[in-house]
Image (cartoon, rainbow, N blue to C red):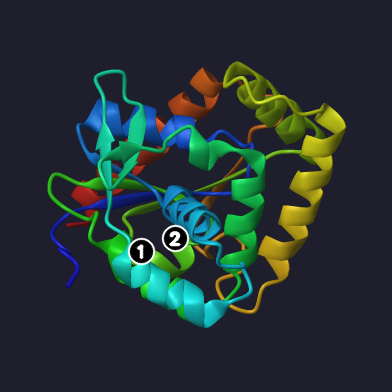
Amino acid sequence: MQNRAAPVITIDGPGGVGKGTVAHLLAKKLNWHVLDSGAIYRVVAFAAEKAGIPVDDYDGLLKLIKGIKATFSTDNEGTMHVFVNKGDITARIREPHIGTAASQLSVYPPIRTALLDCQRQFRKPKGLVADGRDMGTVVFPDAQLKIFLDASPEARAIRRHRQLLQQAINVTLKDVFAQIIERDARDRTRAVAPLKPAEDAVIIDTTELSVDEVFTEVVLQWDLRQHKDTHSS
């Protein structure tokens, strides 16, 4: 059961738009909880690889999900760490092939349903900033503010390539760009919870914006929403 007393801000968008960074900055500013929904799917993909379960073995994946004991924690720097069986797998789930596998298994409706309650459990007082691809459309449709970040595929590929190199993951920019195009097509055309802005979302194009500029705009939108709610009540 969701704690509907706890407010939610959703930040959706494709990979490489900066939604994770902005979500953590916003959660830190508001002193709220944060949900990286993509990490949950990556945990399943990582566990499946370790167990030798193919991403199209949906029955096997559903059984696997029931036995996964994952925990999430945020350090003093605002970085989220992911643990499975007390082992820190944060870096492992960020590897490109795990991201691809997570995207592939996420198109299966029963898997999305199985992980829905898990994501909603993050909604606690004082509030939650949730980043993903269907946070505002499916997981938290009653969110107080819905943000959708977007950017050109080229800009997103450059950002993601830089992130991977910083994590000592050696991959070419060409491969990163191809993976982004492939994932966009899969996410936007899947039958359940396709990637798209919620009807009431604020859309921000981050192609030419810095992280600080995007963060400032999101904070402004939250302040405006609070002001509007105060004067309408």
- 136 vs 34, left or right, is right
**Location of residue 143 (image quadrant):** bottom left
Marker disc for residue 184 = none
Foreground: 179 or 146?
179
Q: Nearer the viewer, residue 90 or 187?
A: 90
Read off the residue under disc 1: 140
Pointer 1 and pointer 2: residues touching (CB < 8 Å)? yes
- Residue 119 location, quadrant: bottom left
At horizontal 64% and vertical 32% (from top left) the residue drawn is: 206
Image coords of residue 132 (percent x, y) = 49, 52
Q: Residues within 10 Å of mark 1 (few under 14, many from 20)?
A: many
Q: Is residue 185 left or right of residue 231?
A: right
In the image, residue 80 lies at what x, y percent?
Answer: 34, 33
Outermost right residue: 174
Q: How many other residues sit within 10 Å of disc 2, few (<14), some (14-19) or many (≥20)?
A: many
Closer to the camera in the image, 89 or 227: 89
**Could you tell me which secondary element the residue under label 1 belongs to?**
loop
Residue 41 seen in this snapshot: yes
Residue type marked 2: Gly
Q: Position of residue 222 (x, y in %)?
A: 35, 40
Residue at 30 percent of width and 64 percent of height: 118
Query: Looking at the image, which residue is at 23% across and 32% down?
Result: 30
Rendered location of residue 213, percent (x, y): 53, 22
Residue located beneath label 2 in the image: 136
Q: Residue at x 82, y 28 (%)?
A: 173
Q: Secondary structure at mark 2?
A: helix
Depth order, front residue of 72/46: 46
